[in-house]
Amino acid sequence: MIAFIGKAFAILLADCYKIIPDYGLSIVLFTLLSKVILLPISVMVQYNSIKMVKMYPDMNRIKAKYFGNKDMISEENYKLYQKEKYHPMLDLVPVIVQLIVLMGVVEGLKHFNVTDSVFCGFDLSLIPSKVMGRYILVPVIAAVSAWVMCYIQNKVNVLQSEQSKANQYTTMGISVGLSLYLGFFVTAGVALYWTIGNILAVVQLFALNVCINPKNHINYEALRESRSELNQVIATQSAVKSKQSQEEKDKEKQDYKKFFKYGTKQVVFYSEKNGFYKYFKDVIEYILGKTDIVIHYVTSDINDEVFAMTSENFRTYYIGENKLIVLMMKMDADMVVMTMPDLQKYQIKRSLVRNDTEYVYMDHGINSLNMMLRKHAIDYFDTVFVANELVYNEIRAQEKKYELSEKNLVKYGYCLIDNMIKAYEEADKTTEMHDKPTVLIGPSWQPDNIMDSCIDGLLSSLLNSDFDVIVRPHPQYVRHNEQRLKELRGRYSKYENFTLQTDFSSNSTVYDADIMITDWSGIAYEYSFTTLKPTLFVDTPMKVMNPDYKEIDVVPFDIEIRNKIGISILPEDCNKAADSAGRLLTESDFSPESLRNVREQYLYNIGSSAEVGARYIIKRLIEYSKM
């Protein structure tokens, strides 16, 4: 192919020589023509670069939100690329084309023979590394032209000017190095083509910036704000990391040794961070109360509450995320229980020491695993604790669709809701006596949530009707949108029946409310299954981790349950929310008895999920002990 291109270029070079019968000037003309021919590609790349920089504010905020979680950052960036129809590979097109053209020029000049190949005192048919002397100037000039081009691009190019200094210097180093190589080891004619090409690239860059001015397309103010937000997160995290005490490092080292010193373990629970113990608590306490099984609890949070609960049969270990990778590969345990999905797909792998360790996935919600986890997120688990029939069915459908081995599916339920139900039933409900119905608005924190899309429509409808309204934003929303909440409070301060709640120390308002309004937050299931009161859903865009969830012919729990425990409205219909809320309060389909039936239908083992889960673990560990 290169030989064919070389012969074609030789013909084109010969035509240029006919127009300007000078070896060097004909190469200059050829270089100019190649830039003109490839101009559409340069225009396409200019637009693509502008599109990339337009996304930088969103990308910076993704980095800030998921700082340190490379997998989530990549996942969210991919979704952003799809949304904006951005193609990262387009930026490689000019590089690939340029290299192909360069190889074609090298080949073409071999076939471009003229009687006089001298230009500006240099024979362009000679190779500097073979003749040396003053021809050393050829690679030096080529390298200088490359440096000038990169320097200007780093200042003026819409994309390169926004990149880090490290990326800029790396690109510059590669370009200058390649130019030196070309200057030394190919003919001086090729070096001339490369030098003129670099100069024309600078001219073209300025021309494109005039014709397609990035300032007309990019919100540089938003870019500066997002960069500032990201820098604050980086500074905060760096400060936290720098404060890591020697005691903390020592504890990780000691706990790592202690973990392996114990030898073969029956069961290991792994927690990603403080607060996750609540998902294991009831199961662990049942096992400790009924057996003499020693539970090993590994956490990646030095401040995890579990360190205050260590006992002879409940042993805790602090293992940071980096050491965790090795620990998991060296795992010697009969069973490992975790709420973290994507086993084997990213850093955390199954044991390399034992191939019979049983890996158990225990979700920290009752949502669809097919829709709310990444595709194939639980493929490498042996056992899954399942909360409801729909999740059970979708796992079986996944196994059939993707030809996977059947997992052990434990019809488990959800301990947290069990505890909520018990606490609610035992609570003093005299505070629930209201002069008028209370509506609690509890949005999610995902993009286009209620707070960002239709909060004013909801409030104007409800506040001007016979409702008390409490707005309880997601804690992360409160953290990142202080000014918006201040403005919201100001707009509705005249209403005595309006409360904006940003103190999350108590859940009393959650259970006291007569109706919950949310979008796709899991708080809806906890609220309705606990209180047997209805939820009004607003159909904002769904948060979907697996865009291919429809490959499985099972309706996700998150979708089906919406019209079982409440009704759904569109964001544009929020100005009629009072009518929908009134319907929820009066229709028998949403009475406590009806919602109790729904709860029984859609949640396994209400009130006894911990016992079911613990008994399964105990049974399997006994079987392991007999092997």
Image (spheres, rainbow, N blue to C red):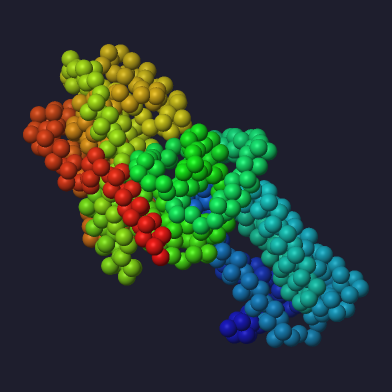
Q: Quadrant of residue 19?
A: bottom right
Picture layout, residue 328 above or below residue 465: below
Residue 27 vs residue 102, the one in the foreground: 102
Give residue 242's position: percent from left, percent from top: 66, 37
Q: How many marks?
A: 0
Quadrant of image for the N terminus:
bottom right
Give residue 483's position: percent from left, percent from top: 45, 25
Residue 543 vs residue 225, the one in the foreground: 543
Tell which residue pokes out farthest to the right in this image.
133
At a point 35% along the width and 52% down the height, the residue shown is 618
Tell which residue pokes out farthest to the left in this image.
588
Give residue 64's position: percent from left, percent from top: 52, 41
At a point 88% along the width and 78% down the height, the residue shown is 131
The answer to whether residue 491 is visible is yes
The answer to whether residue 157 is visible is no
Give residue 198's position: percent from left, percent from top: 70, 62
At a point 75% along the width and 72% down the height, the residue shown is 182
Picture layout, residue 543 above or below residue 578: below
Quadrant of image for the C terminus:
bottom left
Residue 387 vs residue 561, the one in the foreground: 387
Residue 93 vs residue 134, the one in the foreground: 93
At a point 16% along the width and 46% down the height, the residue shown is 601
Picture layout, residue 498 above or below residue 231: above
Q: Is residue 86 left or right of residue 228?
A: left
Q: Is residue 63 left or right of residue 139?
A: left
Picture layout, residue 517 above or below residue 502: below
